[in-house]
Image (spheres, rainbow, N blue to C red):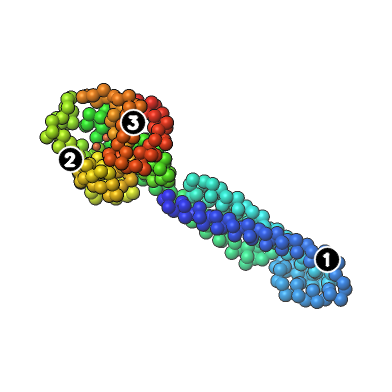
Amino acid sequence: MEEMRKHIVRISRIIQFSIWFCMAIFGIVTVLGFVLAFYPYQERNLAELNTRIVDNANLLPIDLIHMFLKNSHIRLQICFAGICISLMALTVFFLIYELRKIFRNTIKSQTPFTHETCEALKKLSVKALLLVVFSTLAGIIVFLLLRLFAYIFEYGTFLQEKAEETNHIQEEMIMSFAEVVENKSEQTGKHVRRVAEYSRIIALGMGIDEERAERLRLASTMHDIGKLLINDEILEKPARLTDEEFDEIKKHPGYGGKLLKNVEGDVMRMAKTVALEHHERPDGRGYPNGKSAEDISIEGQIVAVSDVYDALTSRRSYKQAWDPQVAYEEIIKGKGTQFGDAVVNAFIRVYPQINAVREQMQG
Ligand SMILES: [Fe+2]
Ligand SMILES: [Fe+2]
């Protein structure tokens, strides 16, 4: 949907440029029409102008006026023709001006397909019927075109609402999953939500676009989903783990990857990557696959930093919460070995925001 929105905005910009161009043209035609109507012609030029403009231009579809003009003075005929040209150009100018306002709102809006846009296009199509006065065919064509646009936007609005509904359901499902994992593991409180927020902040700090950062915020909530398959006794053990138990815990990224193996959609695919890679390290000493720096996705590296920072600053059954400043320095110490260089650099840059979120989301 986001891609479609960008596409629409891009098209709208082109349309807006064309609209400016057309407004300029019809503005000039309006002025030329008045010049034609009121220019002080010399008598010998009038007859020639009359033949060229009035008889051939087909600018006066109102037959009665045309018939009236046929029998009137040449100067009057030209004057009427000029005024008609001006009025027609002026009508088109204002129709285009209204259209410009609609497209300007579309560009500004985060959701280009809105009921307001549909209604505005429908109203404009009715105003376009004014053109019938000057040219029946032009009026009907413009009316139908604007109606067609309005229906396309109406259908777009319907699809957009459905997509938003689906996204909302997907987000709710992801958060529910995350809560299940959170309740199962020893990570009580708001670990999952804090990791999600930290990940989003770091992603933005790295220059990742808003849309991908938001996707990461959601995807990161499932980083420990593999713990669903780990024995409760190990997860809930109120003491330090033995080596065997820790080896069992180390399987959770692999389990997470398997659980999400066949998922569809950008967020869920990213969730799979994050679940698999959030314990990998650039120096190759991570788990489950001991991947090297260049093989770990940027999302996996970001969640690794968020997860460790939050684990350090949170109280667990076997340890006290670390002082945030000490935890911050610990992350910096891990730069290039435990954590990716670029991610740690971004973490340092956005640390005030991360610290503020940590303070807000205590407990
Ligand atoms: Fe984990
Ligand atoms: Fe975690």
Asked if the residue under mark 2 is in contact with the one under mark 3, i.e. CB atoms within 8 Å, the reply is no
Q: Residues within 10 Å of mark 1 (few under 14, many from 20)?
A: few
Please tell me in which quadrant of the rendered image residue 317 appears: top left
Specify the quarter for ligand 2.
top left
Q: Of the two numbered discs 1 and 3 on the same chain, state the one appearing first in sequence.
A: 1
Q: Is residue 59 above or below residue 19?
A: below
Residue 131 position within the rendered picture, expressed as x and y whole percent measured from the top left: 66, 61
Picture quarter with the C terminus: top left
- Tell me the amino acid under the disc marked 2: Lys
The residue sitting at 18% across, 38% down in the picture is: 250
Q: Residues within 10 Å of mark 3 (few under 14, many from 20)?
A: few
Q: Residue furthest left?
A: 244
Residue marked by disc 2: 251
Q: How many angstroms separate mark 2 from mark 1 (CA)?
A: 89 Å
Disc 2 crowd, CA 10 A, few/some/many (<14, 14-19, 20+): some
Ligand 2 within 8 Å of the CB at mark 1: no
Towards the viewer: 183 or 284? 284
The quadrant in which residue 280 appears is top left
- Write down the residue under mark 1: 39
Query: Is 155 located above or below residue 278 in the figure?
Result: below
* Left-right relation of 332 to 145: left
N-terminal label among 2 and 1? 1
Q: Real-space Cα distance between discs 3 and 2?
A: 28 Å
Looking at the image, residue 39 sits to the left or right of residue 5; the answer is right
Residue that numbered label 3 is attached to: 329
